[in-house]
Image (cartoon, rainbow, N blue to C red):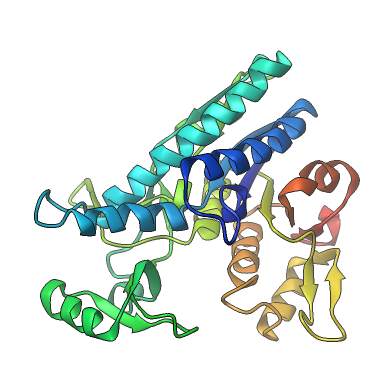
Amino acid sequence: MKTAVIAVGGNAILRPGDSLTPENQMKHVSATCSGLADLIQKGYDIVITHGNGPQVGNILLRTEIASGEVPPNALDVCVAESQGQIGYMLQQALSSEFAERNMGKVAVSMITQVVVSEADPAFSNPSKPVGRFYSEEEARALERKKGWRMVIDKRKRGWRRVVPSPEPIAIVESTPVRRLVFGGEDQAEVVIACGGGGIPVISKDGRYIGVEAVVDKDLAAAMLANNIRERLFVIATDVEHVCVDFGKPTQKPLKRATLSEIKMLYDQGQFPPGTMGPKILAAMRFLEGGGEEVVITATEKLVDALERGAGTHIYRNDNSR
């Protein structure tokens, strides 16, 4: 069997500058799912994960607008809502592709919880911006009224709420995900899971409890891939290759690397936190957790990357090449 966990980025759902309309989102989702269907026709059984940045921000905005009229939803519930929303779009577009191509497949989206530690230092140092921009006066009022942590945006566009972004330590639903993706030669299910980094929960007194946080989507996808014992992890983004010396005259694409080589480049600061850094960190975590290969490439290059070697390939060691 050829299997993979594929993490699709935000550009698979919405492109920069596009308005957050259902029509725009569905247009891009349909194009993405056409490419994923091409890959599945090549014999791959896959798990798809996805981001939720603009969508969960929109959900929070609606909650704020309705404040006082309806009870507000906690952040973990908003993440769950975005999982359902985007999962529905991916599920519909994929199943439509399958039906049109007579593939005998069906997409299944799974509401997925991600376990984090209550002792994670991220809870005392919120860093992930969520929701809309505010003026400084509005931000100070929200700090007093709601106890939110507010910070000025790096590009000076305004003030935003920041929330904890703890490390994922387990995926609650990893067993059913594995059962579905490794169901056998004639299995029909294509799984969509861990959307938006998963719904953050802590384990306490034998129960799972949702927490006000968001989990990095690429780290959660890497954790899911490790939890289901997948060997191949694919990060679909908006560039064909990872580059070293990005933005400099010496910039060049990185086509092949081992875990030790990518660690060295990461430690040298080649992959900044706001750009490729989180993806490279997720790649390293996956390989350190037992995975064999990571592919990072543009969404439209998935088939070329997996069938013909395009994109950036990172291996656990030389023997994995």
In x, y percent, where is residue 67? 15, 57
| Residue at 57% in and 77% down | 273
Q: Position of residue 313 (x, y in %)?
A: 80, 58
Q: Nearer the viewer, residue 174 or 85?
A: 85
Question: Which of these two is toward me, 85 or 213?
Answer: 85
What quarter of the picture does the N terminus occupy? Answer: top right
Q: In the image, is residue 12 above or below residue 146?
A: above
Image position, residue 321 (x, y; %): 86, 55
Please count the marks in the image: 0
Residue occupying the point 27% across, 53% down: 62
Say if 169 sits above or below 86 in the image. below
For this view, does 17 lie left or right of residue 307?
left
- Relative side of 16 to 21, left or right: right
Horizontal side of 211 relative to 272 (left or right) equals: left
Q: Is residue 186 visible?
A: no
Q: Is residue 244 visible?
A: yes
Q: Is residue 224 above or below residue 140?
A: above
Residue placed at 71% from the left, 30% from the top?
A: 37
Residue reaching furthest to the right: 308
The residue at 86%/63% (across/down) is: 255
Q: Is residue 283 above or below residue 307?
A: below
What is the quadrant of residue 80 in the picture? top left
- Image coordinates for residue 107, horizontal then vertical, percent: 55, 26
